[in-house]
Amino acid sequence: MITPAFAQATGAASGADVALQFVPFVLIFVIMYFLILRPQQRRLKDHQSMVKNLRREDTIVTTGGLVGRVTKVLDDAAEIEVEIAPNVRVKVVRSMVSEVRVKGAPVKAS
């Protein structure tokens, strides 16, 4: 008693149905961008400007946990010299500075 009309009711998916299936993926990407990618880019930009603006007498904390005072900053080099104890100076890669605690004296005009 089943008529052939029921079997013919299923057809090919239309273009609107296919586009509608991609909407959740687009929404997930937008949410990921605003919750994960954008804040990470902002933190990276802030860290780069902090490292770029290091100067003598700044008190810094490295990613390894060392606290010291910057004694020498070279503009062209990727390293700075940090005094971690009286008369104990070490070279530190600029990108390994995680925090600047106390700002030092302004740079002398040359």
Image: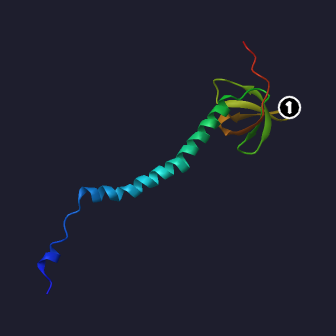
11 or 82, nearer to the observer: 11
Residue of label 1: 87
- Going by the picture, which residue comes out furthest to the right? 86
Image location (x, y in percent) of residue 28: 45, 55
- Going by the picture, which residue comes out furthest to the bottom? 1
Residue type (three-letter) at the residue carrying disc 1: Asn
Image location (x, y in percent) of residue 69: 80, 33
Res 92 → quadrant: top right
Identify the colour scheme used.
rainbow
Res 90 → quadrant: top right
Q: Quick check: 15 left or right of 62? A: left
Q: Quick check: 27 left or right of 21? A: right
Q: Which residue shows up at 20% across the image and 64% down it?
A: 12
21 or 2, nearer to the observer: 2
Q: Quick check: 43 left or right of 54? A: left
Q: Residues within 10 Å of mark 1 (few under 14, many from 20)?
A: few
